[in-house]
Amino acid sequence: MTFSAEWLALREPYDLRARNAAVLDAVAAAFAGRPAVAVVDLACGTGSTLRALSSRLPARQDWRLVDNDLSLLARAGEGAKPGVRVTATPVDLAHDLELALDGPLDLVTTSALLDLVSGGWLERLAVEAAARRLPVYAALSYDGRIAFDPADPGDAEIVAAFNAHQRRDKGFGPALGPAAAQAAIDLFERVGYATRHGEADWSFAPADRAIQNETLAGFATAAREMGRPLTEIASWLARRSDLIAAGRSSIRIGHVDLFAWPTGNR
């Protein structure tokens, strides 16, 4: 599954604001005092994780940015600061995860990926990371929580349809969807990792009209693909869009950040 560069650019400021500060601090602390760090970023998109994290890591950095979308990879190194070496590498992560993790590495990162993958793929990630004793920073996994203000009678049905849609195959097998964050915590702890995790929610204020409209359109598309009646979806979307246009809509969408690192217990 791929996303447009325009959507990734629209969401990046909200992703940055949502990232959990305590989890970011844990990542920074793990590499404090080191002269250099080598990172692989899985499903890098246009490089938002690089831009969000590089200021928290040692000055000399070597980033391997991995994605299967060549058009996104072409933009992925934009905004890299001096001292940061970037290599864009096309990899089909559904089949070649192990290839992406090979070579000298200190840290695995990813953002907005785990809720799109299957339980089997996530287990592969945990096992392969543990075999290499690599810490993993996985940010912005959607966890199923959506709150609209003001509420609408149609919200619950649309959210239920969207959450069901999140569990459909996104290219990695049946997706974990909202269950991904807890599944990742459990898997990494099972392979002997310590974890730091916390909420990293999107928060859209009334002035954030563009991303609210794009988000609602995505909810409506998912609901339609899950078989909700078109008249129900259209009516709900019209009411919510009117609230956005009137500057009366706020939306909070739940995400979880996770940092998992190997301990001496395994």
Image: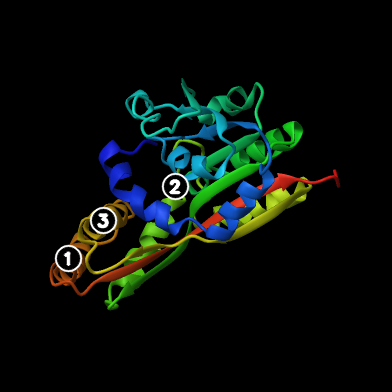
Q: Quadrant of the C terminus?
A: top right
Question: Which label was assigned to residue 211?
Answer: 3
Direction from residue 256 to residue 75 in the image, left or right: left
The answer to whether residue 92 of the structure is visible from this angle is no
Direction from residue 249 to residue 35 in the image, left or right: right
Query: The disc labelled 3 sits on which kind of residue?
Result: Ile
Residue 263 or 53: which is nearer the viewer?
Answer: 53
Other residues around mark 1 within 10 Å, as few (<14) / some (14–19) / many (≥20): some
CA distance for labels 1 and 3: 12 Å
- Local SS, label 1: helix
- Kindly identify the residue that appears in the image at 62 percent across and 27 percent down: 101
Image vertical order of residue 90 relative to residue 193, above or below:
above
Image vertical order of residue 183 relative to residue 80, above or below:
below
Question: Which label was assigned to residue 241?
Answer: 1
Query: The disc labelled 1 sits on which kind of residue?
Result: Ser
Image vertical order of residue 114 relative to residue 178, above or below:
above
Other residues around mark 2 within 10 Å, as few (<14) / some (14–19) / many (≥20): some
Closer to viewer: mark 2 or mark 3? 3
Question: Which label was assigned to residue 168?
Answer: 2
The answer to whether residue 209 of the structure is visible from this angle is yes
Q: What percent of the width, then of the height, locates residue 213?
A: 21, 58
Query: The disc labelled 2 sits on which kind of residue?
Result: Arg
